[in-house]
Every structure is written in C-alpha cells, then in structure tokens.
Amino acid sequence: MAECERRFLDGRSAAAYFDLVTGTSTGGIIALGLASGLSANEILARYLEQGRTVFPRISRAHPVRHTLQRGWLWTKSWAVDRYDSAPLARMLDDILGDRRFGDAEVRLIVPSFDQHHEVNVFKTPHHPDYRLDWKEKMVSVARATSAAPTFLPVFALGERRFGDGGLWANNPLMLGLVDALACHAVDRHRLRLLSLGCGATSTPMSRARVERGGVLAWRKALDTAMQLASENTLGQAGLLVGRERLLRLDHVFTGTAIALDDYERAAAELPSIALDLVSRHEHALSRFFDGPRPPFTRFHS
C-alpha cells in the first residue's frame, strides 16, 4: 500500500480512495492507522522502527543459539504466552494516540472474538444500528484484533476479554463485502475489492498425514484451516461481485513461510516482495486510485 501511495498518489494516504477498509490482526492495525489519517508509508516506518521491540530479535548470526532460543520460545508457549504485550501497546499508542474508533476517516470493519468464544466485529458508526463501538479507543480495537493466542496475552476491555480475529476471519474480505451490501443499496456488480495478504504457503498434504495421521502429523492444522478459509472467502467474494472485480495480492512461499514473530526475516524479505507484487499488478491496482471517495455519514458520535 505504501508503494501504491508513491506510484499513484504522490505519497498521499490511500484511505480516502476506499469506501470501506477491513483488516484482521496486523491488517487491523494498518486499517486503523490509515483511518486515523496516516499514510501507509508512515505506518510502515513505525513497523520497521519498533517491530523488533514487539518481537525481540533472535539473531541468525549464531545458528545454534538461534535454534535454542526458538526452541525455548516454542516450549514456553505450551504453558504461557511467548511475549509481553507492553511493547505492542507502546507502538499502538505511538501510531493511534488517543483517537476514538468513531473518529475514523473511513468506514472500518475489524474482527476479534471474546472470552465466550463468540465472534465480535468492531464497526464504525456508518449504520444507525452500529451504536456501541464508536466509543472505544482505536488502540483498544487494535489490541483486541491482534491478541494472537500463544504469542500475546488476551486483551481486557472492561469486563470483556478479546483474542485475535485471525482465528475465524484471517481473511476478512467477506465481512467487508457483506457489510457493504447490508448497509447500502448498492449493486454488487459495481463493487471493486482489493484484498492484500501477508504471505501464504503452497504445501501439499504430507505423507505422514496421508499414511499415519495423528496429532503430531496434524499439529499445524490451524495454519491449514486459516489458509483454506481464506481461499474460500476469495471464492465466495468472486462469485458475488465477479472475479474480474476482485484483485488479490499475496505471495506464496515455496519454502518455509515467515513466522508471525520473525521480525528479522519479515523486515528483510517482505518490502521487496511487495514492490514486485505492485509492479506485476500496476495496471489493475491503478483503478483503485482513480479518485477519492466521498466521506461517510456518522450516525453516532
């Protein structure tokens, strides 16, 4: 998105060019940052500057030490969360400040789930029925959607506890599409959808899963489930609006995907991957930036 701003908008924020933005976990943080008036480039700079404090660096310069540290974190995560949430809270305070969710400059949909294992979707007040969430601070919504189980503690907001929306809406595209169709009298074939991923893997079912099964072979079934759910989301959205009106940008890793907490590898690899994706899809992307969208009406504030 930062590269799109550079190529199409002379560095201006991309938020004004979309009617609705939805994001889960780190995508939710980025969506909130854009809706608060920051450019994607400004958000990217904060990620690169402060990301290593959220997920402390485990240097690859000493392979044995790196392996031992990763092993210790993996073992630790069986009993407690791997990381303290304080560094993330400080980074979010820096990005979002004291802004309230209802102050967003674009319609937002940000998924999470609560302590009763019930889905929860934070929605800006762009419909008369959306009466509650506008009062929350953007930082609170960001922490709720990004409280990744085993990595970070659940987030306490009043009497409620929240966890990462990625467990059920890793790709929140359909949440945005359904909201757009439910809240507005709009022809679904007039919608244009841009979906940005964080990297996927192309891993066929292993021989162990086929021939033996068991917990050990299926220990990463959650990753498989989230990837399949994302593919299903894209398929459903494409059927509703027409596949030609949906652009999905993601990178498929042929080897090991970047771990959620691997800041060092993410910072080294993802920027160049993003530049390549934008270059290969530049013409299709340019259609999303042909003019700013009108501001939305806030029904509650």
Image: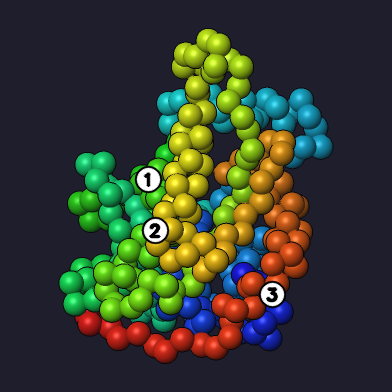
Q: Earlier in the sequence, mark 3 or mark 2?
A: 2
Give how far across and how far down residue 223 sits, in percent. 51, 36
Image disc number at residue 168: 1
At horizontal 23% and vertical 56% (from top left) the residue drawn is: 158
At horizontal 54% and vertical 18% (from top left) the residue drawn is: 209
Instruction: Please tell me whether residue 104 is drawn above or below residue 138 in the rendered image.
Output: below
Give how far across and how far down residue 25 sits, in percent. 46, 54
Find disc 3 in the rendering and name its residue. 283
Q: In the rendered image, which quarter contains the C terminus?
A: bottom left
For the residues carrying marks 3 and 1, which lies nearer the camera in this image?
Answer: 3
Find disc 2 in the rendering and name its residue. 174
> Dot 2, crowdedness within 10 Å: few (<14), some or many (≥20)?
many
Judged left or right of residue 29, residue 53 is right
| Amino acid type shown at disc 2 | Met
Image disc number at residue 7: none
Q: CA distance from mark 3 to mark 2?
A: 24 Å
Name the residue nearer the viewer: 251 or 259: 251
Q: CA distance from mark 1 to mark 2?
A: 12 Å
At horizontal 22% and vertical 71% (from top left) the residue drawn is: 130
